[in-house]
Image (cartoon, rainbow, N blue to C red):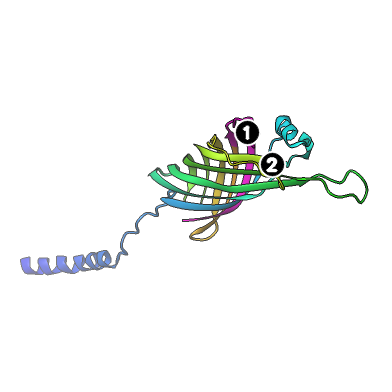
């Protein structure tokens, strides 16, 4: 009786053993956190602010100065602290020379054009950001303090290079949407606060100014 009971129990346990062996392996949870790295390349469109002082030094009016420009900004960012939907980012950005120009219209019909005024701007700075969202789509707030350059000059009479570079504070935000595994579309709206530049030989003084800069482009990770 004992042997029969053992055999009977063994037969009953076989389906349970087989079922346990047929169970699929546990699926690891998907890591949907932001990061850990992203790089940007964006077309940037700054809105330059006019200055009556600069215009007077160039012999033109404030309305003659360029109001908009076009350039390129590139950057790279790491996310050393990543939560489920929030990440801290550190990195750097380089706003390559953004340029805008304006040519004064002729004063008489069919007359020659007046001078062309050119405004140029650059900025290089480290960045710190707070990012909100998930791996394939997130927004961010960012800011950085670095150095840059800003000049407005006549195209045929450029000013001398500055001896020192003014400090540039930038702050704003944006978003990235990954439509492919490693490629995203990005938008960014930033304010750049450019420090004042003192007058020098063959170079007018440039007052402190704050410019709004919109940019759009791609990101990769």
Q: Nearer the viewer, residue 58 or 62?
A: 58
Q: Which residue is mark 1?
A: 210
- Residue 205 covered by magenta stretch: yes
Residue 7: x and y in percent read: 12, 69
Above-or-below relation of 5 to 143: below
Q: Nearer the viewer, residue 80 or 4?
A: 80
Q: Residue furthest right?
A: 109
- Residue located at (64% from left, 36% from top): 203
The answer to whether marks 2 and 1 mark residues whose Cβ atoms lie closer than 8 Å is no
Residue 144 visible in the current orientation: no
Q: Nearer the viewer, mark 2 or mark 1?
A: 2
Q: Residue furthest left?
A: 2
Whole-number angstrom distance, CA of label 2 to CA of label 1: 19 Å
- Residue located at (75% from left, 32% from top): 56
Q: Which residues are magenta?
A: 192-221
Q: Nearer the viewer, residue 119 or 58?
A: 58
Q: Which residue is mark 2?
A: 153
Q: Earlier in the sequence, mark 2 or mark 1?
A: 2
């Amino acid at each position: 009786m004992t042997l029969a009971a053992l055999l009977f129990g063994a037969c009953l346990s076989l389906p349970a053993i087989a079922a346990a062996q047929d169970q699929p392996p546990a699926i690891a949870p998907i890591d949907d956190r932001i990061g850990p790295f992203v790089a940007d390349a964006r077309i940037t469109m700054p809105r330059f602010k006019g200055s009556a002082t600069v215009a007077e030094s160039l012999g033109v009016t404030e309305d003659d100065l360029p109001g908009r420009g076009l350039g390129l900004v590139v950057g790279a960012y790491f996310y050393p602290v990543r939560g489920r939907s929030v990440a801290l980012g550190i990195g750097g950005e380089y706003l390559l020379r953004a340029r805008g120009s304006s040519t004064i219209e002729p004063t008489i019909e069919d007359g020659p054009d007046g001078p062309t005024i050119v405004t140029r701007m650059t900025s290089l700075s480290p960045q710190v950001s707070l990012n909100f969202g998930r791996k394939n789509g997130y927004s961010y707030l960012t800011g950085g303090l670095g150095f840059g350059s800003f000049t407005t000059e006549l195209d045929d009479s450029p000013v001398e290079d500055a001896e020192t570079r003014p400090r540039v504070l930038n702050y704003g935000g944006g978003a990235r949407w990954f439509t492919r595994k490693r490629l995203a579309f990005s938008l960014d709206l930033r304010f750049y606060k450019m420090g004042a530049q003192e007058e020098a030989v063959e170079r007018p003084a440039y007052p402190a100014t704050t410019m709004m800069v919109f940019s759009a482009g791609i990101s990769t990770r």
